[in-house]
Amino acid sequence: MKHAKFYDVFYPEENEKIMFIDSIFKKYSVRDVLELSCRTGSVSISLARKGYNITGIDKNKDMLQFFSYRTRGKMLNINIKQKDIEKIDYKNDFDAVISLRDSLNFIHDYNALLEMLKKIKSSLRKNGIFLLEITNFLSWIERYKKEETLFYQRKNLNIMRYIKRNIEDLHGIIDEKEFGLIDDNGVLTTYCEDRRIKIMRFEEWMKILKEAGFKNILYYSDYKFTVPEKKAKKVIFIAGK
């Protein structure tokens, strides 16, 4: 992603999310955290500022370079690694693993996803937890748009994103094609991206988490301590080792 430094303009992190995660971590006495697909590090940095020891992994070099730039000169306990999340090989190293923004929905094969979840479980210490954020596709489908144009404005920055979507009903895949135009203080750049995201319902996630061996699975909606409803945009699972 060549426009990594603008990622947080597209997807700003909400303080409510950080407060929710922090409260969960305190409940489970979490200290050492692995963030999968950490991107530009917004969540990792916010959690590190609260005293957690963070390991962030992502396979995107541009994202990690910007993440590293953001932490330069700051006294934060953050370890950044460039790695495909499907190739993690940790054993009992973390109190918590977090996966946000539908990162695991990019793994389309069921067996590959199951193996990924087993690796996550293996990376947790005794009584460790896996915090998983997914899109609630029941509400998403009601807001679904085949085409969408988004505009972002900041000081000396203007961005236009055009996104075209198609749902492959047979395989439950959302195929997204995105074109962007960025005016950064008079410097114009463009980009194109393709994304393929697997649609999985709440019940499917519950099934595969249990199959991977997770226990005492709790779930909440939109980073509030409430049971998910159909209109919820996000579902957050807390799964115990």
Image (cartoon, rainbow, N blue to C red):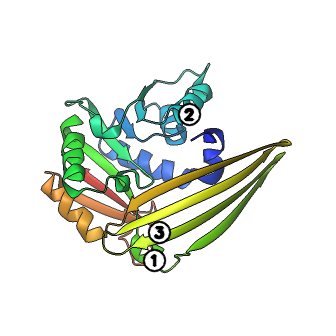
Residue 115: give x, y in percent of width and height: 19, 46
| Category of crowding for the residue at label 1, using alpha-carbon neighbours closer than 10 angstroms: few (below 14), some (14–19), many (at least 20) | few
The image quadrant where one finds the C terminus is top left
- Mark 2 or mark 3: whose residue is earlier in sequence: 2
- Mark 2 or mark 1: whose residue is earlier in sequence: 2
| Residue 125 visible to the viewer | no
Residue drawn 61% across and 46% down?
A: 7
| Residue 218 visible to the viewer | yes
Using the image as rendered, state which of residue 87 and residue 123 is in the foreground.
Answer: 87
Is 12 situated left or right of 106 in this image? right
Q: How far apart are marks 2 and 1 (CA)?
A: 31 Å
Quarter of the image where one finds residue 168: bottom left
Callout 3: helix, strand or loop?
loop
Is 188 situated left or right of 114 in this image? right
Residue 87: give x, y in percent of width and height: 28, 35
Q: How far apart are marks 2 and 3 (CA)?
A: 28 Å
Furthest residue to the bottom? Answer: 142
Q: What residue is disc 1 on?
A: 141
The amino acid sitting under disc 1 is: Ile
Q: What residue is disc 2 on?
A: 62
Residue drawn 59% across and 22% down?
A: 74
Q: What residue is disc 3 on?
A: 233
Using the image as rendered, state which of residue 202 and residue 21 is in the foreground.
Answer: 202
